[in-house]
Image: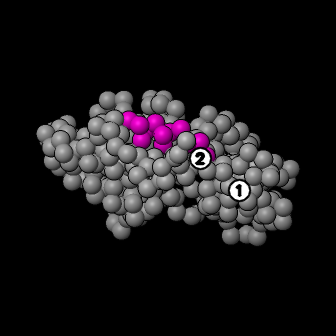
Amino acid sequence: MMQLRVLALLAPLTLAACGGAQEAPTARDDAQWDQAMTAGKSAFDLGRYSVAISQYRRAASLALLRDDGVAASEAGYDLAVAQLAADQPQDALQTLQAARQAAAARGDTHTASFDLVQAAAFYRLHNTAQSIDAAERAVGDSDQALAGRAALIMGLAADDAGNSAALQRANTVLQGFKKPLPRSVQAGQAEIAARVALSSTPATALGLAKHAAELWRDEASYRDMSRALALGGTAASRMGDTAQAKSLWARAAQSAAMQASDEAQGDAATLAHGAISRGNPHTAQSDAALWSQQAGGVLLHPFEKPKTN
């Protein structure tokens, strides 16, 4: 199983085949299915989420054609992840429902990865209660990267909802993982610990939030990095350090603004195939606007050439 990346984005993964006996030919062996999955991953890695969605949808349909439950689960998961990356959480939930039904009909009951994406989709839709419930089902998975991401999402949703019990549960899960840990899990540990400490010891929360931001940056998880920087701004503000708070909020705002600009750019090489984009920039734009306001106003695109009339 490929290690999950942390996105605000999740990454497509390959579900591991089970058993020692040689399996009968399935959609996994079908050249068209393999081509669609490969093309979907390549498009996803380049941020061409509309292309990835189209390819994964085709792969899922081919898996059903061959009545291959494992391949249907894999393609359905990847399709939902691509939809979530493109800021289409409602579509991702519909895909997950279809993938669960296809898997269940073929005897596949291991759905922790589905629960993880479902938790992320509900969180994106601001449905914190259902996000926490879905994440809770995934935190016990044996894959620490998957369980760590689920605990992070549970902690974020709990913090937004003011659910201290769920926030503490997420922190307990994250702190209980055995080392060595993927950097993404370390970042989640630091960020959720910072959120736990924020109300009582903001100085501790500030240090943890900064550490989390550095780890997210090293993972190239810039949405997560921006969120951790903004959390640091809140901690500094509660300490009475207005200057540092504004600096951290400004940094978070500028990074989010760059993300929005990047996501809004069309892919010129593939525009002939339809409305191809890198995703919906709305979420990053909203974050940038909020953090800029908290910073007292900041130039979000300082290196862009000034527009002339």
Q: Secondary structure at mark 1?
A: loop
The residue positioned 24% from the left and 53% from the top of the image is 208
Farthest residue, direction right: 65
Instruction: Compare residues 169 and 262 and report the one nearer the observer.
Output: 262
Identify which amino acid the numbered label 2 is placed on: Ala
Quarter of the figure that contains the C terminus: top right
- Report whether 241 appears left or right of 251: left
The residue positioned 52% from the left and 32% from the top of the image is 125
The residue positioned 39% from the left and 60% from the top of the image is 217
- Secondary structure mostly seen in the magenta stretch: helix
Q: Which residue is mark 1?
A: 268
Q: Few, some or many C-alpha atoms within 10 Å of disc 2 (few <14, some 14-19, many ≥20)?
A: some
Instruction: Compare residues 138 and 260 and report the one nearer the observer.
Output: 260
The stretch drawn in magenta includes residue 283? yes
Q: Secondary structure at mark 2?
A: helix
The segment highlighted magenta reads 279-290
- The colour mode here is one colour
Q: Few, some or many C-alpha atoms within 10 Å of disc 1 (few <14, some 14-19, many ≥20)?
A: few
| Image mark for residue 91 | none
The residue positioned 29% from the left and 33% from the top of the image is 164
Identify which amino acid the numbered label 1 is placed on: Ala
Q: Position of residue 10 (x, y in %)?
A: 54, 52
Q: CA distance from mark 2 to mark 1?
A: 12 Å
Q: Which residue is mark 2?
A: 264
> Do callouts 2 and 1 mark residues in contact (Cβ within 8 Å)?
no
Q: Position of residue 260 (x, y in %)?
A: 51, 46
Quarter of the figure that contains the N terminus: bottom right
The stretch drawn in magenta includes residue 81? no
Q: Is residue 230 visible?
A: no
Q: Position of residue 160 (x, y in %)?
A: 36, 33
Q: Position of residue 273 (x, y in %)?
A: 80, 51
